[in-house]
Image: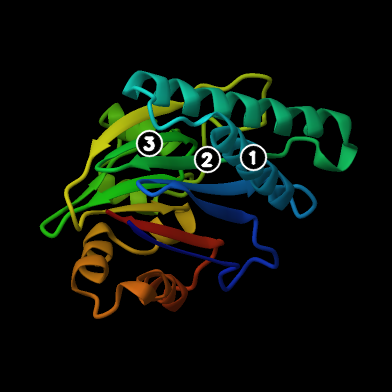
Amino acid sequence: MEYWGITDTGLVRAQNQDAYRIEQLDRHTVLAVVCDGMGGAKAGNIASKLAIDVFTEEIIRSYKSSMSQEQLEQLLTGAVKLANYTVYEQSVKVEDFAGMGTTLVAALICGKTATVINVGDSRCYHITREDIHRVTEDHSVVQMMVNRGELTLEEARVYPGRNLITRAVGTAPTVESDVFPVYLERGEVLLLSTDGLHDEVEDQEILFEVVHGVNNDNCCQRLLDIANMRGSPDNVTAVLVMV
């Protein structure tokens, strides 16, 4: 298994409130996590870093290679709940952190099976040599409008309120997450990204760079460069894991 990651402030924001972490748990298991913090200059980066660290350390502490798929899903769900409560507790205790929160998307890849979890509008994509498929569904106002038939996917990409999310880690005492199993063949890729990337780079462009790029080692950089060429109004983060 190979993996790469990159995060960047972008061309407009003064501070990077995105965060990512990749951990190899054993020879056949990798955990990748991406967060996009919110809550103003004093708190967004705190929320994303705190959520990633609490979530990841809980997985490291509790993961066992003998776990069933159901147990892996419970492990990820429990880690999100712990991260959520930790961020929320800090937002209540510290005045400067009031209202902070973060998106979270993570993939626990065990051999050829990945378990993906998400809260908010950071995404996971499954990329094969022929196609790109979005695994997660955004928890956002725009996604609700798409589901109701009020917007097409193309309209949603440019809708003024596309960054309004309906769920986040740390904004309430509890949070619901969605979990998805993904089955991978050799050479296939998972991409975790924040909206600073996937709002600027279209799915087919991502597919082309991942599949046809000359060098996998700089694929994340090439995706970042495309986002920056388009103005990057938000922080940009991309993590790739290839089985």
First in sequence, mark 1 or 3: give its number. 1
Question: Which residue is depicted at the point 17% across and 48% down?
Answer: 185
Residue at the disc numbered 3: 116
Which one is closest to the eye, mark 3 or mark 2?
3
Question: Which residue is depicted at the point 59% across and 36% down?
Answer: 55
Q: Can see residue 126?
A: yes
Q: Amino acid at mark 1?
A: Ala
First in sequence, mark 1 or 2: give its number. 1
**Are circles 1 and 2 on residues that touch, CB within 8 Å?**
yes
Q: Amino acid at mark 2?
A: Leu
Q: Position of residue 234 (x, y in %)?
A: 55, 61
First in sequence, mark 3 or 2: give its number. 2
Label 1 secondary element? helix
How far apart, in angstroms, are the residues tagged by discs 1 and 2? 8 Å
4 is higher (above) or lower (below) than 174: below
Q: Position of residue 77 (x, y in %)?
A: 49, 24
Residue at the disc numbered 2: 104
Residue 169 picture quarter: top right
Quadrant containing the N terminus is bottom left
166 is higher (above) or lower (below) than 187: above
Q: Can see residue 199?
A: no
Residue 47 picture quarter: top right
Residue at the disc numbered 1: 51
Q: Amino acid at mark 3?
A: Val
Q: Nearer the viewer, residue 228 or 48?
A: 48
